[in-house]
Image (spheres, rainbow, N blue to C red):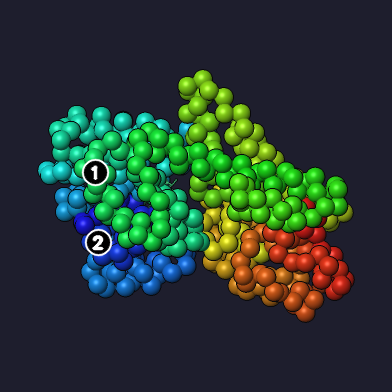
Amino acid sequence: MKLCMIGTGYVGLVSGACFSDLGNDVICVDNDSKKIENLKKGIIPIYEPGLDELVKKNYKNNRLNFTTNLNKAVISSDIIFICVGTPTKKNGKAADLSQIFNVVREIRSSISKFKIIITKSTVPIATGDEIEKIISKKISKKMFSIVSNPEFLREGEAIRDFNYPDRIVIGTGDKKSNKILKSLYSPLISKGAKYLNSSRRAAELIKYASNAFLATKITFINELSNLCEKLGVDIEDVSIGMGLDKRIGGRFLRAGPAYGGSCFPKDTKAITNTADKFKINLSIIKSVIKSNKNRSSLLLNRVYNILNGKIKNKKICFLGVTFKANTDDMRDSSCLTMIPSLIKKGALINYYDPTGEKKEFRNKKNVSYSKNITAAVKLSDLIIIHTEWNDFKSINFKRIVKNKKFRIFDMRNIYSSIKMSEQKIKYFAIGR
Ligand code: NAD
């Protein structure tokens, strides 16, 4: 099939590369000309395991192409996936849909034969209705079908998640579009993915509800870990014990820093905002947002306590600054709250991240980047393990840290408290 992905970011590029790998002709569009130029040269704009090879292979085979020319790409395609960003509005809670509607207005002029137009971006309930209204002002409704096909992939696992999704949700009442999309996804359905055809509004809501639920699981276990610290119970035992119950499941049940990333923070805000408009109080999700906001202050308090309240001129090293491992995505990472707050108190921050230096901290006073783990931790008073990269899982701290009085705050519970105590390392974890 001939597909067009509009927006070549985490979702558009991964889905585009994977669809082309399944034998479709895919053209990825972006209005960032540098990104498109680089992709044509084989330079991948994001860190995502396996993506590099997949993009290069399919670009070489001419099944995957890149352009800035949206109109041309739409004209030559049968199925258009809108994959642009839907961030939170500045100073607000609602999703900013300007990127979506800009694209929709542009697409309009290129519809001369039947097109399926899909929102893969996460959009609030009834956005599909609005898109349909905008396009039908200029184009007959017979010429297009607006479908919601929310994306559930996780950064860091995106290629696996695309190829082996738990479910594919297609929100449309149009039988013809449903048949075409079922056939597009048939290679994944035959590998075991469940296919759900729902109403368009339901599909839009399924995405928000799923993200809000996962954010709730994380926040739930984070709060329980606070209680575990008081009780002398290990939160890891609690997570495993709860997760063994199939009704609960162990995923997203690991205590750690505040959840971040490009989805949970914005999507929890957007769904409560939608509900408020309909005078429905989604009080659980609202408390999740509040609890998650408090999480970074709570962990910062622990940092102060670990350093006996003496932060000024203390050398604090962060291992990993993205919102989670295996991604370079800094959006809403809890480091963006914690590091500035520690600097304000006079700390000297040094960090290492396997995906390299971050523009968010470049030229920031008292923040420096080290090119490897050894250089990063060497002189530290406190080492904070912020993300769970494999690279951080078997470090010989005793050997490489030169400051004999160093402490470790393991925000991901990677290490064993017992082994650390055997080595006489002052080690602090979450919920233990
Ligand atoms: P992103 O910011 O990485 O990518 C969006 C891309 O769209 C950018 O490259 C941008 O330049 C491009 N763009 C914006 N306006 C454009 C226009 N008019 N024409 C062409 N290109 C344009 O965003 P993302 O992380 O891929 O997320 C996209 C959507 O998918 C969001 O709604 C997000 O909530 C949702 N989503 C994201 C993930 C994830 O893990 N990142 C997972 C599931 C769903």
**Quarter of the image holding residue 366?**
bottom right
Q: Position of residue 57 (x, y in %)?
A: 32, 73
Q: Which residue is mark 2?
A: 24
Compared to residue 287, the image places residue 4 above or below, namely below
The kind of residue tagged 2 is: Asn
Q: Nearer the viewer, residue 311 or 395?
A: 395
* Lateral position of residue 45 relative to residue 292, left or right: left
SS type, badge 1: helix
Compared to residue 340, the image places residue 35 above or below, namely below
Q: Residue at x 69, y 74 (%)?
A: 394
Q: Which residue is mark 1?
A: 177
SS type, badge 2: loop
* Lateral position of residue 101 relative to residue 239, left or right: left
Q: Position of residue 327 (x, y in %)?
A: 52, 61
Front of the two marks 1 and 2: 1
* Lateral position of residue 204 relative to residue 175, left or right: right
Label placed on residue 428? none
Q: Position of residue 374 (x, y in %)?
A: 69, 75
Q: Residue at x 38, y 33 (%)?
A: 201
Crowd rating for badge 1 (residues with CA inside 10 Å; few <14, some 14–19, many 20+): many
The kind of residue tagged 1 is: Ser
Determine whether label 1 and label 2 are within 8 Å by CB. Answer: no
Tell me the quarter of the image containing the C terminus: bottom right
